[in-house]
């Protein structure tokens, strides 16, 4: 049997364009989720997104599987990724999107890279944190404290519990990503994502069946457009580009996504969603984003 051909690494220009596309699309998904929930219940919307994304990824896997190479992912790994990253994580995001502004949600979810670095410090050999990175954590926590003390209470009594619940989403996603990082080397990312997306779609469908009524869903053109955009652009395209670049582009370059995406989401929330941008949100955002920069852009010393 002939070995699978090796994919050529992208040129710096192509890599930069791909990163820009991911930032723009992922930055826009928060406001698109929010707008789609005007017509669709949250778990119904999420389930539809991942069923479409799963079938689209299945088609891409059939076309590109041989070119990508990689071993078949173990069932426990794609089950874990599906349950944690696509099932539980997005169930939380969609539910809290009915209660909180999209810009704030993106900003709160922006703690993901900091949590990821902390977990890597404990579990990944050679990825120890340096003092400047610990200072980044302190800045990020300071920014969260500003938001919890000022703008969240102003949104009503349910805002703080909703925000605290939302923070579980990046936590479970970090667990899933760490499992993939530890045990997913050499497996097909296409097959891994395809299987995990179907698992997430099934779990979100169960949640929708248990907590929502089909009569609540209004499949307007805007609702259908939001689901298609989130499935094809916000899931298939972006995750496909990310795992393609991850094979050859330095991780510190991909880390740009972590602090550009919340900035775009905040801006779109104000310009498109009519969300308020207060001085305390700006201060909290600056603290969180600077903390992310310090955490993800500072390389740990080489392991000895």
Image (cartoon, helix red, strand yellow):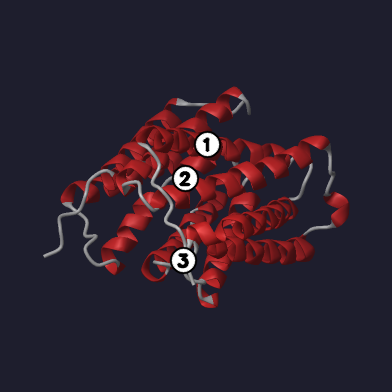
Whether residue 88 sits left or right of residue 115 in the image: it is right
Tell which of 231 and 37 is nearer to you: 231
Image point (51%, 41%), residue name: 106
Image point (38%, 31%), residue name: 283
- Residue extending furthest top? 271
Numbered badge on residue 276? none
Residue 152 visible? The answer is no
Above or below, 119 against 259 in this view is below
Q: Nearer the viewer, mark 3 or mark 2?
A: 3
Tell which of 263 and 152 is nearer to you: 263
Q: Nearer the viewer, mark 1 or mark 2?
A: 1
Numbered badge on residue 70? 3
Q: Position of residue 85 (x, y in %)?
A: 53, 60
Residue at disc 3, secondary structure: loop
- Quarter the C terminus occupies: bottom left
Numbered badge on residue 108? 2
Whether residue 113 sits left or right of residue 137 in the image: it is right
Numbered badge on residue 27? 1
Q: Position of residue 69 (x, y in %)?
A: 48, 63
Distance of label 3 from label 2 (alpha carbons): 35 Å
């Amino acid at each position: 049997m002939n070995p699978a051909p090796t994919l050529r690494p992208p040129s710096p220009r192509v890599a930069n364009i791909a990163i820009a596309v991911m930032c723009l699309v992922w930055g826009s998904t928060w406001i698109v989720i929010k707008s789609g929930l005007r017509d669709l219940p949250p778990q119904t919307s999420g389930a539809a997104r991942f069923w479409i994304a799963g079938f689209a990824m299945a088609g891409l896997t059939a076309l590109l599987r041989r070119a990508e190479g990689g071993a078949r992912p173990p069932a426990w790994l794609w089950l874990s990724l599906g349950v944690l990253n696509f099932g539980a994580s997005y169930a939380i995001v969609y539910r809290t999107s009915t209660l909180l502004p999209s810009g704030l949600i993106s900003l709160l979810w922006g703690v993901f890279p900091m949590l990821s670095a902390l977990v890597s410090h404990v579990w990944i050999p050679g990825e120890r944190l340096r003092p400047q990175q610990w200072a980044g954590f302190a800045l990020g926590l300071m920014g969260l404290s500003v938001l919890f003390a000022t703008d969240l209470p102003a949104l009503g009594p349910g805002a703080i519990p909703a925000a605290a619940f939302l923070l579980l989403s990046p936590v479970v996603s970090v667990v899933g990503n760490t499992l993939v990082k530890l045990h997913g080397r050499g497996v097909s990312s296409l097959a891994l994502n395809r299987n995990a997306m179907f698992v997430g779609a099934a779990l979100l469908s169960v949640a929708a069946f248990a907590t929502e009524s089909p009569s609540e869903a209004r499949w307007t053109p805007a609702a259908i457009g939001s689901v298609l955009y989130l499935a094809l652009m916000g899931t298939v395209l972006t995750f496909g580009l990310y795992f393609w670049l991850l094979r050859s582009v330095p991780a510190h370059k991909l880390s740009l996504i972590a602090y550009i995406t919340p900035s775009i989401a905040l801006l779109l929330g104000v310009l498109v969603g009519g969300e308020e941008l207060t001085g305390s949100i700006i201060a909290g955002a600056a603290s969180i984003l600077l903390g992310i920069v310090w955490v993800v852009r500072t390389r740990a010393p080489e392991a000895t």
